[in-house]
Amino acid sequence: MPDWERKILEAAPVADPAEIPANSTMLRAHERGHLINAASKTFSNFSVENPLDGRIEGFEATLARMLSIYLTGSSEVETITATADTRQSLIDNGTTDLVLYAFSITPERQAAMEFAGPYYASQQAVGTMADTEGISQLTDLIGKDVCTSGGGSAYLTVSERIPGAKQLVLESPRECMLAVEQGRAVAMVSDDTSILGAVQEGKMKIAVAGITLEPWGVALPKGSTESVEFINDWLDQIIKAGLWEQLWQETIGKIPGTKMAIPTPGENLNAELNLDDFVG
């Protein structure tokens, strides 16, 4: 564990057990002694498995450890591998306590589950290889092979706004990056932070930025309103203590071109997907 993460975890708050909502996944995690989170293991800078020791690292991974500390006093997190397609089912069938994995808050999803947060806000972008030319706006993608993650909001963006594109649907942004590198797609549409990880490596560039504005929330079973309030209180505490900012600086903030926007839990819950903006 890096020193910066150790210091953040040592400073993380612990909840009064009496404040943990009864008959909730939060209470089950407390009684179990650790949190179960459904997340990616390939999402650079957010939730990625270290090949040397198998440890999950990144912004979301450390947030999950902080939440586990808040619930149980222990930073142990059991990570269930999730994709954009499987996240909701893992909540619905009780496999996970929650999902802390790039889950954009949308009205359709709010009808099926609860969201605490937001804990982060991203924007969708179009990523291409660094030497690709001729793509500077969405209309340039008409008739071209474009990769998205199934079950994610980027899939809706391409389906609704650029139906003339040939969509290649894969499980994760990492697989889309590989598809672009291999020439199976000329571009990918995903959240900007996942693409910036490849930009950081010099492989890709942001060809079209700011397509959407998407708040990310901690997904919980439908009806878990007390758990939403409980997690929002935790988020307020780590934001006011400066721990959220420290974590951002050590993870996402190291990617060139990123800008910090400290969230306000319980506010700005509506994603701006602009799905009516038909381009061809």
Image (cartoon, rainbow, N blue to C red):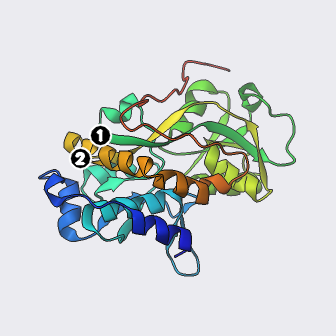
Near-viewer residue (175 or 270): 270
- Circle 2 sits on which residue? 227
Asked if 278 appears above or below 172 in the picture, the reply is: above
Residue at mark 1 to residue at mark 2: CA–CA distance: 9 Å
Rendering coords of residue 45 (x, y %): 59, 59
Q: In the rendered structure, which amino acid carries the disc numbered 2?
A: Ser
* Residue at figure coordinates x 26%, y 42% from the top left: 229
Callouts 1 and 2 close, C-beta under 8 Å: yes
Instruction: Residue 1: give x, y in percent of width and height.
Output: 52, 76
Tag count in the figure? Answer: 2
Viewer-side residue, 98 vs 5: 5
| Quarter occupied by the C terminus | top right
Kind of residue at badge 1: Glu
Front residue of this view, candidates 200 and 154: 200
> Could you tell me residue 108's position as x and y percent?
37, 31
Q: Residue furthest bottom?
A: 52
Give the residue displayed 65% in from the left and 32% down from the top. Answer: 210
Read off the residue under disc 1: 114
Query: What x and y, as percent, mark residue 97?
Result: 28, 57
Regarding mark 2 in the picture, which secondary structure is present there? helix
Q: Quadrant of residue 136?
A: top right
